[in-house]
Each structure stands twice: as C-alpha cells, then as structure tokens.
Amino acid sequence: MAQWQEVSEKSKLHPKPVGLVLQYGTAGFRTNADHLDHVMFRMGLLATLRSLNTKAIIGVMVTASHNPEEDNGVKLIDPMGEMLTPAWEVYATQLANAEQDHLISVLKDLARKESIDLTNREAEVFVGRDTRSSSARLSDAVLDGVTALDGRNKDYGLVTTPQLHYMVCCCNTRGGYGKASVEGYYSKLSQAFIQLTKSAPNRTDDQKCLLVDGANGIGALKLREMEPYLQGALKVSLFCDGTGGKLNHQCGADFVKVQQNSPKGIVMKAGERCCSFDGDADRIVYYYSDDHGRFHLLDGDKIATLISTFLKELLTKAGLDLKIAVVQTAYANGSSTRYLEDTMKVIVRCAKTGVKHLHHVAQEFDIGVYFEANGHGTVLFSKAAEEKIQQLCDDSDGERRGAATLLKNSVDLINQTVGDAISDMLLIEAILAIKGMTVQQWDAIYTDLPNRQLKVKVSDRRVIDTKDAERKTVSPAGLQEAIDRLVERHQDGRSFVRPSGTEDVVRVYSEAATQESADALGHEVSLAVY
Ligand code: 16G
Ligand code: ZN
C-alpha cells in the first residue's frame, strides 16, 4: 500500500538511534530532548491510529513537565481528555523501540490487532507544546507523523498540558464541555471565577493579591494571557515568568515540594499567599512564610482537604445527597487522611501513584476529589451529579439555590480532564475568598505529621512488588514483616516502599510523631530494603 511506503520514507527523516530503548511510563516518554525525534514522529503515527480506532480526536502534548530544560517528552491524550489507555501505552513502547526496518511491520501488526480501517481518512490529532527550546522542532516531528498517515491535525502551539486536554474533551463532546480554543478556556474559567467571588463581596484588595511562581514556563505565559479575562477579580504578581530565568531551575512546584522551601530569589512578606506551578502547569502547591520567617507548604493533601470541605458544606446546604470521596496515594500525610475520615466524615480511598490511577478511582463517586501530595489533582463530577446540581439551580430558591449556584460555578471552574494549576489556583482562591479564610487558617485545619522521603539504589528495583495501593510489599519475602516491626517502635509511625516508575530507585516514605523519629524510621526501612 502506498501509505506504508510514504510512512517508511518519512520515517527515514526521523531515524531511531540503534539500540535506544525507552518506555512509555506514567508520564509518557521522557528523556534528553536529543533522543526524541523518532519517538515524536512515531507518536504522531500512533495518535493517528488511535484516532481511527476511537473515531475521535486524540491529543499529543510535547512536554517534560518539571524536568530540566534539556529534557523533553510526549504524552497522548484520549478522547475524553483523559490519559492514554494502558493497552495503547504498550503499543507506544513497542513503536518507539522498533528498529527502523521493523517499523512498518509493528504498525501493521497494531492495525490488525485493533481492526483499524486504514482506508478511513477521518483521523484528527491536536498537538500542543511547552516552552522548551526543543519543543517546536519536536512537535513538528509529531505533525510529520500525523500527515504521513493522512491524518488531519490542529497545531495549538504553546499551551499548558491541561489546556490541550481541555481542547480534546471540548471537541469530542461536541461543544458540551466548552469552546475548544484558549479564549474559550479563559472565558469559561474566568466567568465561573468571577461568579464565585461575587459571593464574597467584602474581599479586600489584599485578599485579591497572590504571588505566582510560573516555573519560567508555559503556565506563566498563559496566566498572563488570561489576566484581562479575570477583570481584576484576582491580582496576580507573577515571578519566574520566563523573562529571565531558566525553566524549572530553582523554582516551580516540584522544586518547592522537594526542597520544602520557596523558589530562589523570591521575597515573601510574612503571611503572604504564594503558589508555584510546574513546567507544564498541571501541578500546583501553595506556601507562605510566617512571622518567624518559617516556611509553610500547603501541598496536594491540604488542597484536597480545602476543596472537599467546601464542596461537602455546599452539598449539605443544598440538601443534595451526593456521594463525595477524596482519593489520595500512600504518600498522603496521615494527618490529612485522619482529618478527612474522622472530622469531615468523607470517604477516603487510596490509589497507586500516577494520575491515571487516582482519576480512575475518583470516577466511582458522584464527586471524586483526587490529589497527589505533589500537587497534581482535580475534581470529577458524575453526569448525574451535574444534572442534579443544574436542576437545583433551576428549581429551588433561598439558601438551597445559593449553594447550588456555587456548586454549578465550581463545576464550570474545574478542569475535569486532568490536574490544572490555573484552574486549581482559581478554585482555591475562590474558596478562600468565600470562606473569608487566610492561608494560615487554611494551613491550621490540621498539622502535617513530620515525614521523610528517601531513595535507595538497588541492583533490580523490580524485585519489590507491592499490594494494597503500594502500602504493603508482597516481595521480597519478609520485607513487609521487617517494616512492620520497625514501624511499631515509632509513635504514629507509618512507612512504605515502592519501586519508582520514573527513576531506577526504590522510594522509601516514613512519617512519625517527630521529625527525628520519621528520619530514623526512614533510615531503618532503607537498610531493610538494601
Ligand atoms: C509521574 C506521575 C506523577 C507521579 C510520579 C511518581 C503522571 C502524569 N505523572 O510523574 O503523578 O507522582 O510519576 O514518580 O501520572 P515515581 O514513580 O518516580 O515516584
Ligand atoms: Zn507537569
């Protein structure tokens, strides 16, 4: 078939370095940008096949998120704006690793297995990229892959990862989710934010101010673009906005979370509210410095607590009987889990690390709030929940209607496709405004248990197998018993180990009543792993 010949010819312009093996992991493909040209071309091919397979638009985002500027990566987005389905992650790996001579046979195999009709010309792929210097040429390689298989494409250029997820979802739901343009995204979110903050009429100018660290990346660019749409309802002081510094270098959500410190060079007044995005703006953390200059981090657990508390209170006021749950990972601070279960009385579920796992569990509820401690998360509303909220807005009055309207505006403000730093930030700002809460009061909802994260290098991390959402090990034999014995010796002790999905290490997490105790437990468990 002529098509295969064209693919074969074009693929020669994107040659694979012989022997290079990469894996489509929890964050897609990610490595040094110099090794990715062939992967991008092939992901263009794969997205086109996936589009034919699902009869829907597929997204391809070129980004390496919080990794250094020299790296890059690529992720595929499925029709409803969700992460690529696991079976196709396997195809992605096979395709990326096929040596040049085998590429066509791997493609043909895939097409046969998935019964893809290659005479169909209806494939369409949306492409977006972050601000890395390598991203433009790499996204061109993706576009080459799409056209090689006669797919149509729409190049959104510079967008945040969650913006591209939003576009894909909008188009596949035929406008039901919003207008598929950056302007559509800005309008939808801004309108919802302005409506929400109208219920907080006494906001002072001080309360409207927020310091935002844009990680010197795409989030900064897009937030600046969005500002006029917010009509002064939020006053952003943007730093690490990409005009001077290097992407993710000593700034951004990952830096702040890992270092437990503010971005380098930023001056924070005591009590001032600050937040950091990561390099593709799908993660956010908040923080402030207290009167003694001590740094306080409000991570994904604190965000999930604030949001779920707000939504639960509105459900009660609205008299809506909807099942709300918070989905966390094993990394969630024990204090947050205890507060949510014992005080807030919300259902808490634990999922394996990786956004797609949390997303999946959250879908089981009417309202599923999911956040990883690192600040990646969002809220999912079931169709039935959205309908009930809408109905109550139309049919009720007084306090019930007020609560239902706030719920409706929250639904509109939230990007349900994936964690979104801009959308999460606006939701948090609106909640703090409505509740008249300072960042310190939010922080004081519960106190984090001291904790420690360590990595251990072992000869083969795959010997560690876990169960119970990574909270227990099943192999090697005896390890879990050893961890249990160590944990018992520490007050409020908890610890788990898991093989990393992104690095060749085993991760060790420990928490306990004091920092000394958490550190000692982490060290002891590391020795047991080694
Ligand atoms: C990936 C995940 C992130 C997770 C991290 C864990 C997505 C989009 N990203 O970056 O959510 O926290 O992996 O890394 O799912 P680790 O397995 O090395 O600890
Ligand atoms: Zn990211």
Image (tube, helix red, strand yellow):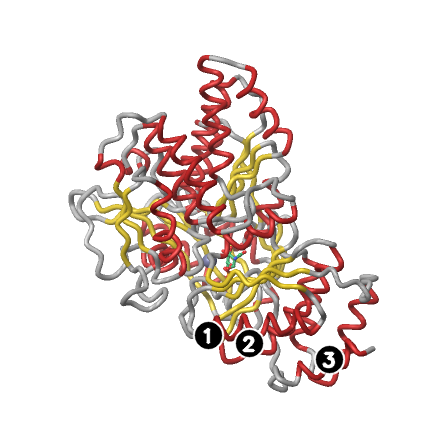
Q: Amino acid at mark 3?
A: Glu
Instruction: Find disc 1 in the rendering and name its residue.
Output: 134
Which one is nearer the viewer's eye here, 457 or 422? 422
Numbered tag placed on residue 6 in the rendering: 3
Residue lying furthest top in this view?
Answer: 398
Q: How busy is the neighbourhood of tag 3: few (under 14 within 10 Å), some, or many (20 plus)?
A: some
Question: Is residue 421 depicted above or below 499 in this figure?
Answer: above
Task: Indicate the position of residue 156 as horizontal and vertical percent values.
Answer: 52, 60
Numbered tag placed on residue 105 in the rendering: none
Please report the residue visible at 56 percent of the width from the left and 51 percent of the height from the top. Answer: 167
- Look at the numbered discs 2 and 1 and tell me whether their residues touch, using CB distance below 8 Å: yes
Q: Secondary structure at mark 3?
A: helix
On-image quarter of the N terminus: bottom right
Which mark is nearer the camera, 1 or 3?
Answer: 3
Q: Amino acid at mark 2?
A: Leu
Please report the residue visible at 76 percent of the width from the left and 75 percent of the height from the top. Answer: 106
Instruction: Find disc 2 in the rendering and name its residue.
Output: 36
Q: Amino acid at mark 1?
A: Ser
Residue lying furthest left in this view?
Answer: 292
Which quarter of the picture shows residue 455?
bottom left
Separation of residues labelled 2 and 3 (CA atoms): 21 Å
Q: How busy is the neighbourhood of tag 2: few (under 14 within 10 Å), some, or many (20 plus)?
A: many
Which quarter of the picture shows residue 466?
bottom right
